[in-house]
Image (cartoon, grey):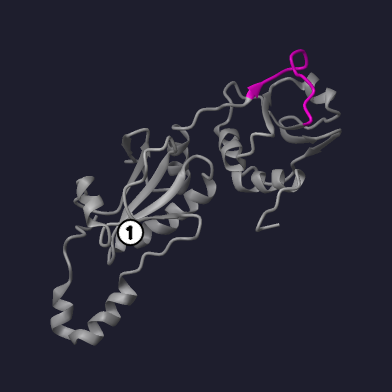
């Protein structure tokens, strides 16, 4: 973990101004994909969860963590707004957080800051982030299900609703689509389907099975394709 207030002035003495600036340009760049929000201040307290990687220029540990964090943001879409904050540029914000070394991973939600202290592996980061998201899907069976024009179904044999379904609902972010979860194979048969467990969407009279990889982003694209919503990746 690097102290971001330390700056390599010896490089300036050794290489001179022009060479020093060239080295700084190359060495001081931790890059993130477009789905990572670039923060210039602390995230707003707006009821949204923000998972933020705190980093700084010239930090080798930050450079090594960035791809893992970016992968976690891809896998954990819907569990948070994934963001990054550069302490070299935003020193005031980092001083408010009492940051003494980087990188750090913080989850901001409802005025509270939760510190991630687990292993820095993308799956572990995603699983930790999922703990801050509540499932809001409607649990149904063959007896209490009411016919719905547009709906998404997760059929599962697990006692608890898999958190991926909450992530999909938030990533898709369309209140016109009802999200259901069921453990009832009778309801599955009522929909004219057989594969259990599984994911299905209903658009009018048509029911389609999702046969891709069970990842939030892929499921979101499937929903967009089914319900005719535009997607930059379709």
Residue 139: in magenta span: yes
- Check the image and report above or below for 204 versus 7: above
Q: Residue at x 31, y 70 (%)?
A: 28
- Check the image and report above or below for 79 versus 72: above
Residue 183 or 25: which is nearer the viewer?
Answer: 25
Quadrant of residue 223 in the image?
Answer: top right
Residue 174 or 56: which is nearer the viewer?
Answer: 174
Query: Dot 1: within a 10 Å radius of its alpha carbon, few (fewer than 14), some, or many (20 or more) residues?
Result: many
Left or right placement of residue 148 versus residue 3 in this view: right
Left or right placement of residue 163 versus residue 153 in this view: left
Question: Which corner quadrant holds the C terminus?
Answer: bottom right
Q: Which residues are magenta?
A: 138-149
Q: Residue at x 46, y 45 (%)?
A: 81
Q: Tell me residue 171's x, y (percent).
A: 58, 42
Q: Tell me residue 61's x, y (percent).
A: 31, 59
Residue 34: in magenta span: no
Secondary structure type for disc 1 = helix
Q: Residue at x 75, y 36 (%)?
A: 201
Quadrant of residue 184 in the image?
Answer: top right
Badge 1 is on which residue? Answer: 62
Q: Tell me residue 26's x, y (percent).
A: 34, 76
Q: Main secondary structure of the magenta part?
A: loop
- Check the image and report above or below for 98 versus 3: above
Q: Tell me residue 207's x, y (percent).
A: 82, 35
Q: Residue at x 30, y 64 (%)?
A: 60
Q: Residue furthest top?
A: 143
């Amino acid at each position: 973990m690097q102290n971001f207030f330390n700056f390599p002035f010896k490089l300036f003495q050794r290489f001179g101004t022009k060479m020093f600036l060239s080295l700084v340009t190359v060495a001081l760049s931790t890059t993130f994909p477009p789905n990572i929000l670039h923060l210039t201040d602390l995230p707003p307290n707006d009821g949204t969860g923000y998972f933020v990687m705190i980093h700084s220029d010239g930090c080798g540990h930050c450079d090594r963590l960035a791809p893992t964090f970016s992968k976690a943001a891809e896998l954990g879409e819907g569990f948070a707004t994934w963001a990054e904050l550069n302490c070299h540029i935003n020193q005031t914000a980092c001083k408010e957080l009492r940051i003494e070394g980087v990188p750090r991973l913080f989850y901001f939600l409802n005025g509270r800051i939760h510190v991630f202290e687990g292993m820095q592996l993308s799956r572990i980061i995603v699983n930790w982030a999922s703990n801050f998201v509540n499932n809001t899907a409607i649990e149904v069976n063959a007896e209490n299900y009411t016919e719905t024009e547009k709906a998404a179904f997760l059929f599962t044999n697990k006692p608890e609703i898999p958190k991926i379904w909450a992530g999909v609902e938030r990533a898709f972010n369309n209140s016109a689509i009802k999200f259901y979860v069921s453990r009832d194979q009778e309801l599955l048969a009522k929909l004219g389907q057989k594969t259990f467990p599984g994911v299905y969407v209903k658009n009018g009279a048509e029911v389609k099975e999702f046969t891709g990889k069970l990842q939030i982003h892929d499921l979101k694209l499937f929903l967009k394709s089914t319900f005719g919503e535009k997607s930059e990746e379709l």
